Every structure is written in C-alpha cells, then in structure tokens.
Amino acid sequence: MLGQAVVAGVVATALLDLWSLALRRLSGVPSLDWAMAGRWIGHMRHGRFVHASIARAAPVRGERLLGWSLHYATGIVFAATLMRVMGPAWTQAPSFLPCLAMGLATVVMPFLLMQPGMGLGVAASRAPSPGKARLRSLATHAVFGVGLYVGTWTASLP
C-alpha cells in the first residue's frame, strides 16, 4: 500500500499545484511560496515555531527544497492515512466521497498549524482578506481531494 500512497499523494499534490498555478496565471491569485514553508520548518530546529511574519524571518539554507519536500511528503502521508482508514479493498476500487472528505479535512493543517505559525493567525485571521483566504484554502484542499481520487484510482490500475 505504500507504493499506492506515494502515487496517490504525488498525483493529488501535483493537481493541487496545477490548480494554484492556474489561479495565479488566470486571476493573479498568489499561491504559497513553498520556500516560506521551508523557512518555517527550518526555524523549528532552533525551537522557533511561531513567527510574526515568516517573510521577515531569517532565510534558511535550502528552504525552497525543504518546503517543496515537506509539501509532497505531506500529500503522501495524507494519502497513506486515507488508505489506512479505508482499507486495502477500498484502494483497489476507490470511491470519490472519502477522497473529497479527506481533502477537505486536510484544511485543518493550514488553518491551525501553518497559517498561525507563519504569522497569518488561525484560519488566516490576520490575512488582508481572511474570508477570501479561507475560501481559497477550502477550494484548494477540495482539489487535493479530487487528486486523491485520481491518484488512488491510478495507483489501483494493474
């Protein structure tokens, strides 16, 4: 099941990234700079978990690679969690709703962990437009859920 989780997680995360890229190109909606996520993670080894503004924090060597690695590893972990909960039989014939539910559930991570840690407050409460930021996060994580379905289905092929 690990191989399937890797495929599903990578496909789901790549679809999320394509969605974010399309939003940025078509409507100018900025997406997360994964270097900033890498910076945030990089500061954790020094005991710093919360920043007023991650953009103003000192750069961390290799932060872009660290951020992108974290992003894809997290997608794989979420896919593996879904597969573990649903069981091996489900991974051979995946259904859409559990994938969508998992995708939407993963929005808890940015709302309660990443955004507060990077200086945006709980559920982007300190963002310039908190409501828009929340809707964007929900839509993006719904797309991740669609990607989980596509990825799990792809990984189930013989």
Image (spheres, rainbow, N blue to C red):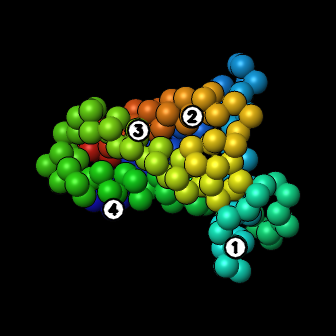
**Marker disc for residue 134:** 2
Give me the C-alpha separation between circle 4 and circle 1. 32 Å
**Marker disc for residue 48:** 1
Q: Which of marks 4 and 3 is nearer the N terminus?
A: 4
- Mark 1 packing: few (<14 Cα in 10 Å), some, or many (20+)? few
Q: Which of marks 1 and 3 is in front?
A: 1
The residue positioned 71% from the left and 19% from the top of the image is 26
Q: Nearer the viewer, mark 2 or mark 3?
A: 2
Give me the C-alpha separation between circle 1 and circle 3. 28 Å
- Could you tell me which secondary element the residue under label 2 belongs to? helix
26 up-or-down from 89: above or below: above
- What amino acid does circle 3 point to? Leu
Q: Earlier in the sequence, mark 4 or mark 2?
A: 4
Q: In which quarter of the image is residue 133?
A: top right
- Mark 4 packing: few (<14 Cα in 10 Å), some, or many (20+)? few
- What amino acid does circle 4 point to? Leu
Q: What residue is pinned by disc 4?
A: 2
The residue positioned 69% from the left and 56% from the top of the image is 118
Q: What residue is pinned by disc 3?
A: 104
